[in-house]
Image (tube, grey):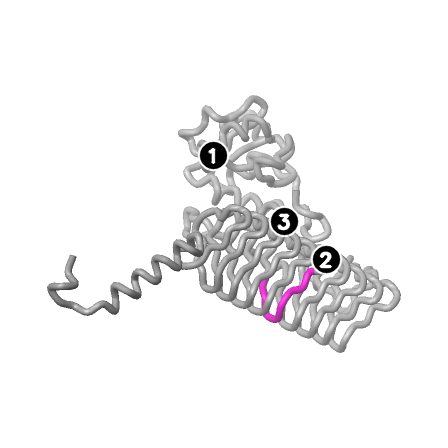
Amino acid sequence: MPDPRFFEDLGPVTLGELAALTGAELSEPGAAERPIRAVAILAQARPDTVTFLSDRRHAAALAQARPGACFLAPKQAEAIPEGCVGLLTPAPHAAYAIAAQRLHRPRANLGREAVAPDARLEEGVILGPGVVVGPGAQIGGGTVIGPNTVIGPGVAIGRQCEIAANVTIGFTLIGDRVRILAGAVIGEPGFGATVGPGGLIDIPQLGRVILQDGVTIGANTCIDRGAFDDTVIGENTKIDNLVQIAHNVRVGRNCVMAAHTGISGSVIIGDGAQFGGRAGVADHVSIGDGARVGAAAGVMKNIPAGETWGGMPARPIRKWMRETAWLAKMATRKEGPENEP
């Protein structure tokens, strides 16, 4: 469920209204007046929420969740569990996105005061010139915030943090002793779109960012909030400048990421993992505890704990080095009959 500190609840709405809004057909026309309070993914669905099913492989999860309603394709109607009303549509994900826009809205920082009257600042907080602190935000004692930084509505920042100039933070919970360098952007929407009847539709990003104690975020780094779940950066992890971390990523404790690293959505990274500069990771990949990714490597599949990978596509470092050496040897050998196989 979206965190009320960051999202306004616009519900409830009836299933009939959602069907009309999305062009879906109710599997039970008599349920048109049933109220729906929120959208939710399958793992968090409740009787007063609507979810979606776009892949038959998750039908068992739908049966276990038993939400109040579910968007799904007509050919998957048999997957509707007892007590759940189907909203039949050829584009379940797009319909879910439309419903999310109807039921939830990000809280806006529209106050006239630079520091909102209901913001809570503990003793010892220092705000530089031009700092904006939104409604309901909380800042712990001893935290220093540099000029022109914007702290969005509901953001919670721990004690003894250092936040530099021109930082933008929204939809985020921050622990103690966190350092965020100049120009970083934390909590903006992750990149997500799906095809709807009239073209691409932005998928509302209803999660948060959580930065645990002792994290360092480099200059001009971007960390997107979760689409459904949270984006989490584990305790004492150190992130360099110009790093991109997408929605729903979970980074373990004591990890290191050098500049220009890019982590795609829903990646899971274990404790103590290390990334060289300009490393890239594809979405939904898992990287084990203590794994190391070489500079400029492109990770397309899971890396077991403790292994070192490099290259593009990334593979175990010794294999990559042998292949690179063999290619260099073949590229420089002299041509002639005696050198032909």
Residue lying at the far front of the rendered structure: 338
- The relative height of residue 81 versus residue 241 in the rendered view (above or below) is above
Mark 3 touches mark 2? (CB < 8 Å) = no
Instruction: Report helix, strand or loop for mark 2.
Output: strand
Which numbered disc, 3 or 2, marks the residue that appears first in the sequence? 2
Mark 1 vs mark 3, CA separation in Å: 25 Å
Closer to the eye: label 2 or 1: 2
Task: Write down the quadrant of residue 48 in the picture.
Answer: top right
Q: Position of residue 58 (x, y in %)?
A: 49, 32
Residue placed under numbered mark 3 in the picture: 230
Which numbered disc, 1 or 3, marks the residue that appears first in the sequence? 1
Q: Position of residue 279 (x, y in %)?
A: 48, 61
Q: Position of residue 99 (x, y in %)?
A: 55, 43
What is the magenta range? 215-222
Residue lying at the far top of the rendered structure: 82
Identified by mark 1, the residue type is Leu
- Which residue is at a point 62% across and 57% down the rendered structure image? 255
- Which residue is at a point 47% across and 59% down the rendered structure image? 280
Given residues 145 and 334, the one toward you in this image is 334
Task: Write down the quadrant of residue 76 in the picture.
Answer: top left
Tell me the quarter of the image containing the N terminus: top right
Residue 217 in magenta stretch: yes
